[in-house]
Image: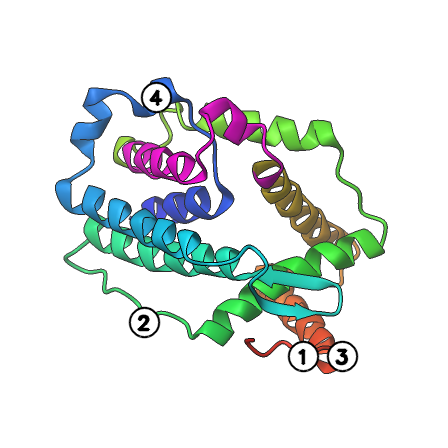
Amino acid sequence: MNRKRFIIISFIVLLVAVSSSLYASATDKDLVTNEQKKLIENAFGELKDQNSSMSKSNFVISGGDIEISKSEFDFYKVNIKLINQLNATLDSSSYKIASLPTDQELIDEMLKKRISVQHAKKIGITVAEGEVKEVINREKDMLNSEDVDVQNQALIREIMHQRINLTGLSEEEFWGSDLVFKEYENTLYIDKLFNKLISEKEISDIQDFEKFQNNILEQYKDAHSTDLD
């Protein structure tokens, strides 16, 4: 069951690609329960309502060289809530929905990712366009792998169907957009930063990396205001 949770978290947050031919399958739809489908529809309906009522210039963090828009924050917050709800449906007997982090805690998590990418670039780490496209293609292929639970595949396809609809883009336009490219590019920067720190013996595991990220977050907060606007 832990594997199921990990897969759902990674696919939702990283915006993993799936093709329209995959999530159009009637068999897959049958694997998504009415409860799960309703949770997904409600989450993206909430995001649609929020997006239609806000200006694109609205920011929750705007200071220094990092900005986090209200729409980015809302998307992240709704994702966290949806992840918890879907995990509960996968293992309702033993899994309890975790309490949601505070808004400031969510902002800090988003900031840690942005600051980690900045740090990676500062110390000379690079990510090539071809590397990003390779990862996207590999993730697509993984959705067809027998190693991935079929119910998770169906859930991911339903989520991505709603995600693409939210943008108003075609599937091809969505996967060719700067939004998706940047998400994967940033993930690669963080992955390379982690591996570099491991190779240089500055950290030894993921727990050490979390401490490293917390440290650079605190350094950033000492120099910039990161309170919610």
Numbered badge on residue 22: 4
Disc nearest the viewer among 1 and 2? 1
Q: Is residue 92 left or right of residue 186?
A: left
**Residue 178 image point, x, y percent:** 63, 37
- Say which of marks 2 and 3 sits in front: 3
Say the numbered circle drawn on residue 99. 2
Looking at the rendered structure, the secondary structure element under dot 1 is: loop
- Mark 1 vs 2: CB contact within 8 A: no
Residue 196: x and y in percent read 76, 51
Residue placed under numbered mark 3 in the picture: 223
Amino acid under disc 2: Ser
- Asked if residue 105 lies left or right of residue 87, the reply is right
Residue segment shown in magenta: 152-179
Between discs 1 and 2, the one toward the N terminus: 2
- Counting from the top left corner in percent of width and height, residue 175 is at 53, 29
Where disc 4 sits, the SS reads helix
Comes first in the chain, label 4 or label 3: 4
Please say whether residue 225 is one of the residues in the magenta stretch: no
Q: Are marks 1 and 3 in contact (CB under 8 Å)?
A: no
Q: Is residue 178 magenta?
A: yes
Element assignment for label 3: helix
